[in-house]
Image: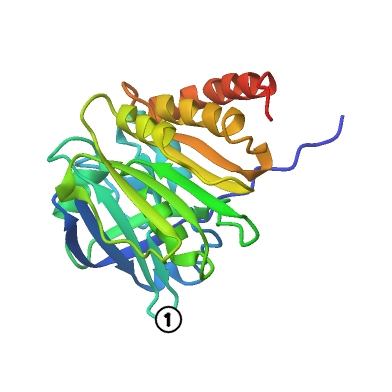
Amino acid sequence: MAEQSPRRKRVPRTGTVVRTGHVTPHVVRVVLGGEGLAGFAPGHTDSYVKLLFPPAGAPYAAPFDLDDVQARLPREQWPATRTYTVRSWDADAGELTIDFVVHGDVGVAGPWALSARPGDTLQMFGPGGAYSPAGDADWHLMAGDETALPAIAAALEALPAGARAEVFLEVAGPEEEQDLAAGPGVRVTWVHRSAAPGVALVAAVLAADLPEGDVHVFVHGEAGAVRELRRFVRTGLGAPRERLSVSGYWRIGSTEDGWQAEKPQWNAAVEAEDAGLSVA
């Protein structure tokens, strides 16, 4: 029996808060910098980082050795991991921008962003990512909620001049809309949440007069809505699997930790459904 190679140790990065500010009433933008981000190089418009938040009163702070923390301390003192999309990376300034959706003191990352001050440190792994808008597509379909907004905003900034895109974004209300880079071929539809998350988004996409042709799809957000929209783009638009970036960032009723544990089973169910779809 061949020996298994030892698991390669992940190398963390540490960012230092440079400045913060509100983009909308419920979105806080945090800009991180410092030598700990040297070599950071997101390669995609949906690049993400895994942020590590020590619990209150933890006997350690960034930078720390995660393996050592998990070996020495009880689980309740381990840092919480939260996945966030890179809103932008300024290589010249060495600044990483991340947008946080906040709801008062609910959650882990949002309260941290609200209280973050220049000089605070934040540890992370990454970046990862896989999607950037294809330059050879006839048009682009992008749809999601607040969790997908940073990646969609970055994708719009990366679109080739003259590219055509239909963009659907669900937010709480008009006060949560953001200014986005949109060329003459881009139509942005803001959808205001009036029922369960994702319901209005799905309805807006299904009711839209969409173009024909080779479409590149980016659909991310609440898992139930994402699954419905995946079914639509596969059967209604005839989009092949290789033209899809479709994923549930979160799920109603699940914490991030819970959702990450559930997601493999969810992905398997979606793949099984996808295999049985009849695509024109």
Q: Pick whichever, 97 or 73, lies toward us.
A: 97
Residue at horizontal 49%, vertical 26%?
Answer: 227
Split into 4 quadrants, where in the image is the C terminus? top right
Residue at horizontal 56%, vertical 62%?
Answer: 43
State the image quarter where residue 57 is shown: top left
Vertical relation: 40 (above or below) 70: below
Residue at horizontal 21%, vertical 54%?
Answer: 28
Percent across and percent down for residue 274 are 64, 24
Is 110 on the left or on the right of 136, as rendered? left
Q: Secondary structure at mark 1?
A: loop
State the image quarter where residue 200 is shown: top left
Number of callouts in the render?
1
Q: How is the image coloured?
A: rainbow
State the image quarter where residue 154 is shown: bottom left
Name, please, the residue furthest toward the right. Answer: 1
Split into 4 quadrants, where in the image is the N terminus? top right
Name, please, the residue furthest toward the bottom. Answer: 92
Percent across and percent down for residue 245 are 56, 43
Q: Residues within 10 Å of mark 1 (few under 14, many from 20)?
A: few
Q: In the image, what residue type sits under mark 1?
A: Asp
Q: Which residue is mark 1?
A: 92
Q: Pick whichever, 261 or 251, lies toward us.
A: 251
Q: State whether residue 49 appears in this view.
A: no
Is 208 on the left or on the right of 174, as rendered? right
Is 6 on the left or on the right of 74, as rendered? right
Vertical relation: 58 (above or below) 41: above
Q: State whether residue 155 appears in this view.
A: yes
Percent across and percent down for residue 188 are 35, 52
Residue at horizontal 58%, vertical 23%?
Answer: 270
Q: Pick whichever, 164 or 58, lies toward us.
A: 164
Percent across and percent down for residue 210 are 49, 43
Is 125 on the left or on the right of 110, as rendered? right
